[in-house]
């Protein structure tokens, strides 16, 4: 050997390995011709490099699959997650609620009807496919008249599968049974164990999700394990942790194989087989199908498993709650949790949870109750009460004024307008529609400017819309908190309502009325807060109140050279902004913050008479707090809202161009609302 | 086929293992091919190597294997000649191909192609001619 250089064999690539072998041989004198593809020694180098490559690849793959972060195979990831005590979520069946009424035929004397487990219904078609929905429990109803009523029946989507196994200790000592179906909703698995073919005594075994569900060596529980190809295995206790099976036990395992999210948002169900011969059935949908979800994906397991481990299957911190709800109910678009000192005023012992469903604006009471009872309560801290708060939507309305050059584009104005609308909706989809979101007008305008080459400039006026569905003919007070400082309206920027609502005037005549804002026009300085008392004052400094109003005056009282008190001796009027500055007195450093009286306005209701004169119905219908962003309608009793949904909108301008949401509030631009984005397009060539 | 002894010493810069992998009966070392013989061995290896035989390098090798199953027409002969020439040009930098002649031939009971390749080893003026009988074996 003429050299000590060793081949570099750390790479994985075949060519790199082979080239390092060649480099090695270059320094040796024994072998030549290794550089020529046809040479016999080159074939040997191929074999050596290939072998090294294979080993390197294999070791690399083994090392990758050993860790949750780098694993690729689902079975490896599931196994790693198992070590963290995390069971990946199975596919979830969509769930719907229906009322079923069965009517018996004339002469039929049936007095009681039972709809057994797995009674089948078919749904209305989606993309030409009808899905099967079934009951998971047996339901019984006595006759009433000729009708048997089954109200609020829960239906689960899926094809029922029933499998029977016989335990044989000799061939199956681990008491493991494979359920060879993909897309099983594990929540629907029911295991009934019969003692033997001769002894028909049966026991229902329940799924163990937590060590706490196994209380003794006789607990009738089974365990679940995700096996290969997303199939599941069930296995049983060993007689120490959970009851063990006996030789000859017969297992009847039933479950649903689901189509997951494909069966969401369905209604129009029909009973497949009426248990009443000659009878009729009528199925009405109470809630359409929802909640169907695909089996948890590999990236989702990689993301959630460590977080679940950190939470230790207990709901303590905010993120515990969010992870918990997301894991168990991925049907939600966004989840926010808050409480304690983050509430104003602080409130302890209560955790507020707000969830935004993927479709619609609020989740059903049944879903909330399910989450509290089955998901949160079992693992939350004893003294903490979970409380659901419906999301409170601040709908953003944009009045856009866009200037463009028609010579720089081949698009018609209508196309430019729809491009702008799409740009704003894209911005909203990426930045809004969720909790703790922010709306920045400059970003939205940038998106508008960039959406079409011919757009020269854009400007926007932002409005915020609060929607309420008032109870008709009932005196109620409605409080809406925007959570954003509001703009004091003057002429064209006043709060307004849409559409009109019917309300009787003092004479009892029904009027088609509106709500508007009356800002307090005579506003003075209420008090002055000392931000910094300063020092070295020998005599009280002179205070100057500077603002857009007139007549306010204040003086200072000093103690030990510092300003100790500010007395407002004249409140003045018409201030919407003011500052207070100190001068003289030989001292320095005193600073002040004045507070204005009129941080509120008044709401009034009005209508237009036949002569189009504005007539005030109620001059004191409510209040508006500009600082807190609270709008209150007092004793509001409309008799009708003039739109089909009965939704009354109050629209007001925010006081800032940057909007943020917290707690249960969600900022959104409603894509369904045709008036959410109003575009005034002007062409510079026609001006 | 020229033997090692017929070539000038300067060409014995090449040495390769013998394809047969037989050992020297005296020393026990594996047999070696040196000089032009090693180049000729390489040329034959390249011609008989099909594409995809070398791991990760499907481009190395010739398509002569497939062509042996074609009909014995002048066109096939041309294709084989072209294939041999391009394979050697691309993957055997030590030789310069001077001429390739392919003819349909029979060898006892089987028919195949007589291939005569004339090439020179770079920097050695004397051309080397090798003759091969290529036939399909299945």
Image (cartoon, coloured by chain):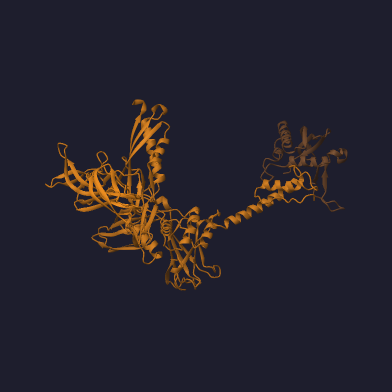
Residue A519: quarter of image: top left
Using residue A23 as the reference point, say whether residue A81 is left or right of it: left
Is B57 located above or below residue A478 in the figure? Answer: above
Q: Can residue B4 be seen in this view?
A: yes
Residue shown at the point (67%, 46%) measured from the top left: A16
Is A18 located above or below residue A165 in the figure? Answer: above
Using residue A330 as the reference point, say whether residue A501 is left or right of it: left
Is A227 located above or below residue A411 in the figure? Answer: below
Asked whether A674 or A403 is in front, the reply is A403
> How many labels sit on residues?
0
Asked whether A148 or A575 is in front, the reply is A575
Residue A617: quarter of image: top left
Q: Can residue A482 be seen in this view?
A: no
Q: Quadrant of the C terminus of chain A?
A: top left
* Residue A180 in the image, given as x and y percentages of width and height: 50, 58
* Residue A462 in the image, given as x and y percentages of width and height: 33, 41
* Residue A144 in the image, given as x and y percentages of width and height: 24, 61
Residue shown at the point (48%, 54%) measured from the top left: A300
Q: Which chain is brown?
A: B
Q: The orange chain is which one?
A: A
Asked whether A604 or A273 is in front, the reply is A604
* Residue A229 in the image, given as x and y percentages of width and height: 52, 56
């Amino acid at each position: 050997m003429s050299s000590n250089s060793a081949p570099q064999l750390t790479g994985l690539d075949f060519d790199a390995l082979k080239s390092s072998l060649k480099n090695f041989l270059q320094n040796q004198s024994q072998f030549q011709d290794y550089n020529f593809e046809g040479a016999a020694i080159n074939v040997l180098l191929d074999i050596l490099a290939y072998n090294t490559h294979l080993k390197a690849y294999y070791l690399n793959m083994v090392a990758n699959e050993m860790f949750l972060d780098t694993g690729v195979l689902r079975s490896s990831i599931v196994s790693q997650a198992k070590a963290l005590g995390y069971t990946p979520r199975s596919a979830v069946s969509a769930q719907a609620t229906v009322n079923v009424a069965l009517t018996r035929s004339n002469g039929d004397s049936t007095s009681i009807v039972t709809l057994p487990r797995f009674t089948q219904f078919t749904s209305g078609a989606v993309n030409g496919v009808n899905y099967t929905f079934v009951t998971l429990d047996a339901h019984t109803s006595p006759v009433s008249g000729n009708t048997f009523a089954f109200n609020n029946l829960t239906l689960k989507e899926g094809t029922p599968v029933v499998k029977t196994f016989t335990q044989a200790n000799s061939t199956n000592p681990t008491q493991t049974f494979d359920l060879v179906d993909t897309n099983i909703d594990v929540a629907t698995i029911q295991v009934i164990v019969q003692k033997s073919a001769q002894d028909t005594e049966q026991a229902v075994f329940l799924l163990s999700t937590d060590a706490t569900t196994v209380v003794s060596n006789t607990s009738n529980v089974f365990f679940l394990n995700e096996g290969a190809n997303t199939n599941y295995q069930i296995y049983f206790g060993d007689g120490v942790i959970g009851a063990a099976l006996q030789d000859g036990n017969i297992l009847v395992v039933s479950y649903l194989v689901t189509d997951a999210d494909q069966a969401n948002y369905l209604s129009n169900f029909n009973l497949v087989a009426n248990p009443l011969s000659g009878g009729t059935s009528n199925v009405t949908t109470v809630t359409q199908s929802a909640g169907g979800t695909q089996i948890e994906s590999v990236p989702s397991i990689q993301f959630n498993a460590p977080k679940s481990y950190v939470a230790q299957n207990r709901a303590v911190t905010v993120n515990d709650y969010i992870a918990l709800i997301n894991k168990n109910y991925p049907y939600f678009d966004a989840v926010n949790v808050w409480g304690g000192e983050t509430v104003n005023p602080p409130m302890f012992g209560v955790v507020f949870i707000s969830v935004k469903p993927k479709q619609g604006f609020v989740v059903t009471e049944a879903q909330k109750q399910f989450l509290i009872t089955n998901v949160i309560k079992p693992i939350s801290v004893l003294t903490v009460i979970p409380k659901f708060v419906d999301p409170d939507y601040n709908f953003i309305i944009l009045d856009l004024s866009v200037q463009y050059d028609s010579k720089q584009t081949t698009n018609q104005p209508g196309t430019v307008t729809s491009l702008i609308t799409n740009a704003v909706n894209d911005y909203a989809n990426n930045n809004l529609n969720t909790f703790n979101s922010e709306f920045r007008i400059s970003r939205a305008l940038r998106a508008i400017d960039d959406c079409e080459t011919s757009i020269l400039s854009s400007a926007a006026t932002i409005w915020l819309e609060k929607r309420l569905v008032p109870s008709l003919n009932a005196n109620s007070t409605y409080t809406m908190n925007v959570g954003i400082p509001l703009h004091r309206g003057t002429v064209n920027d006043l709060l307004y309502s849409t559409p009109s609502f019917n309300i009787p005037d003092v004479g009892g005549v029904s009027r088609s009325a509106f709500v508007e804002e009356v800002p307090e026009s005579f506003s003075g300085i209420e008090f002055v807060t000392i931000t910094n008392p300063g020092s070295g004052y020998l005599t009280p400094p002179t205070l100057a109140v500077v603002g857009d109003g007139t007549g306010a005056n204040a003086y200072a009282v000093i103690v030990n050279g510092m300003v100790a008190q500010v007395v407002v001796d004249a409140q003045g009027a018409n201030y919407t902004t003011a500052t207070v500055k100190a001068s003289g007195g030989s001292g320095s450093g005193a600073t002040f913050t004045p507070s204005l009286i009129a941080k509120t306005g008044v709401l009034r209701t009005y209508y237009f008479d036949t002569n189009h004169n504005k007539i005030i119905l109620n001059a004191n219908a409510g209040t508006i707090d500009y600082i807190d962003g609270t709008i209150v309608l007092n004793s509001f009793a409309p008799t009708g809202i003039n739109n089909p949904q009965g939704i009354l909108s109050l629209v007001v301008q925010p006081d800032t161009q940057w909007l943020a949401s917290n707690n249960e509030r969600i900022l959104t631009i409603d894509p369904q609302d045709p008036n959410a984005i109003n575009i005034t397009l002007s062409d510079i060539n026609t001006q | 086929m020229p033997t090692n002894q017929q070539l000038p010493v300067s060409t014995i810069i090449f040495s390769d293992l013998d394809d047969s992998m037989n050992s020297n009966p005296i020393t026990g070392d594996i047999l070696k091919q040196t000089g032009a013989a090693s180049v000729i061995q390489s040329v034959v290896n390249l011609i008989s190597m099909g594409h995809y035989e070398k791991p990760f390098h499907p481009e190395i090798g010739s398509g002569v294997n497939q062509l042996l199953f074609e009909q014995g027409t002048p066109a096939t002969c041309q294709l084989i000649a072209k294939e041999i020439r391009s394979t050697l040009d691309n993957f055997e930098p030590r030789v310069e191909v001077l001429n390739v002649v392919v003819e349909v031939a029979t060898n006892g009971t089987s028919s195949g192609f007589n291939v005569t390749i004339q090439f020179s080893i770079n920097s050695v003026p004397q051309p080397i001619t090798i003759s091969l009988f290529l036939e399909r074996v299945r």
